[in-house]
Image: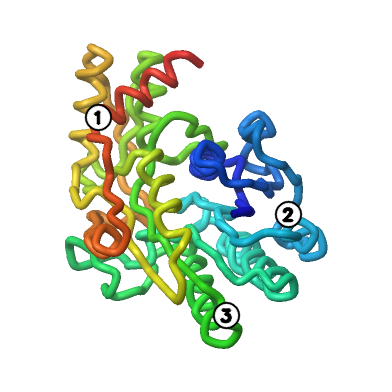
Amino acid sequence: MKVLVTGGAGFIGSHIVKLLVDRGFEVTVYDNLSHSNADSVNQKAKFIEGDILDKDLLKKALLGVDGVIHMAGLIEVSESVKDPETFAKNNILGSLSLLEAMKESNVKKIIFSSTASVYGDKPELPIKEDGKVLAANPYGASKVSVENFLYSYHFNFQFDVTILRYFNAYGPGEVHDPETHGIPNFIRAALDNQPIPLYWKGEQVRDFIYVDDLAAAHISVLDLDGFNIFNVGTDQGVKVMDVIKTIASIVGKDLRIEDLGERKGDVMATYASSEKLRNKTGWKPATELKDGLQKTIDWFSQR
């Protein structure tokens, strides 16, 4: 099976590509390197540098492809609040460009990287796929829009669509600019003996999923037909402050806190029910939080 991975040089995308390659898939990475670099591209994968708004180049990349894993997009919640228009252009119009290129190339299988942010600011916990969808920030809103386009392409053009709504991914290789995700910022600060940057005094509850477990979820759904939506999380809510305490125990340091107050666009508590995905494919997360944090700290320590 030949798979095109848009955004395949990014943090999560590169882990998916590695797993695909290791399992014998033929992989093409399509990435504009705006938030990644060429060093992240797996050497066993074909690489095309391009933007998802470039439909003609996408059509060339889609030659002979059996399915697409669509990872390309802007991801920073706080940045989306500052600049919704850019997020709409990149995430929504870029995805529509990809769908049109796929339709014209007769490639009709897509797995889409969505987010728990689609569930809004006060979701019923644990969050299930039939929960209310009403995004509380422009990043989430862009994902809701793409999900709706995907359903329309399934309904009108017979696309096989699987939407994976990620919870909070973490792990080795996470380097963004700017970096707004908690765990890499916490680890960097801990290793550099700097204060830990913390919003909401660490009272937010999140579902932290190790990146290799998240990558495995994509492989588990490659053969699915029809239209599917799945949460991908650990089914466990953890306070951010407890994550910091675990990092402190691993690095063996007393960590200082830099109180950053509140942050617009944040949701106070999210954690998944991934029962639907587990029942459908047998997938389940294999990495405990402490073990995943240890692997992530080891990676950052070697940089």
Q: Nearer the viewer, mark 1 or mark 3?
A: 3
Q: Which mark is residue 257?
A: none
Q: Nearer the viewer, mark 2 or mark 1?
A: 2
The CA span between labels 1 and 3 is 43 Å
Name the residue type under label 1.
Ile
Which part of the image, by quadrant, shows the N terminus?
Answer: bottom right
Name the residue type under label 3.
Tyr
Where's residue 201, x and y in %?
23, 39
The CA span between labels 2 and 3 is 21 Å
Q: Which residue is identified by label 2?
A: 51
CB within 8 Å, label 2 to label 3: no
The foreground one among 144 and 227 is 227
Name the residue type under label 2.
Asp
Up-down relation of residue 42 to residue 63 (above or below): above
CB within 8 Å, label 2 to label 1: no
Kind of element beneath mark 3: helix
The CA span between labels 2 and 1 is 37 Å
Quarter where residue 197 is shown: top left
The foreground one among 259 and 162 is 162
Where's residue 163, x and y in %?
44, 65
Up-down relation of residue 266 to residue 276 (above or below): above
Q: Which mark is residue 244?
A: 1
Q: Residue at x 42, y 15 (%)?
A: 301
Kind of element beneath mark 2: loop
Q: Residue at x 35, y 28 (%)?
A: 186
Mark sitting earlier along the chain (1/3): 3
Mark sitting earlier along the chain (2/3): 2
The foreground one among 106 and 213 is 106
CB within 8 Å, label 1 to label 3: no
Q: Residue at x 56, y 76 (%)?
A: 159
Q: Which residue is identified by label 3?
A: 153
Where's residue 164, x and y in %?
41, 60
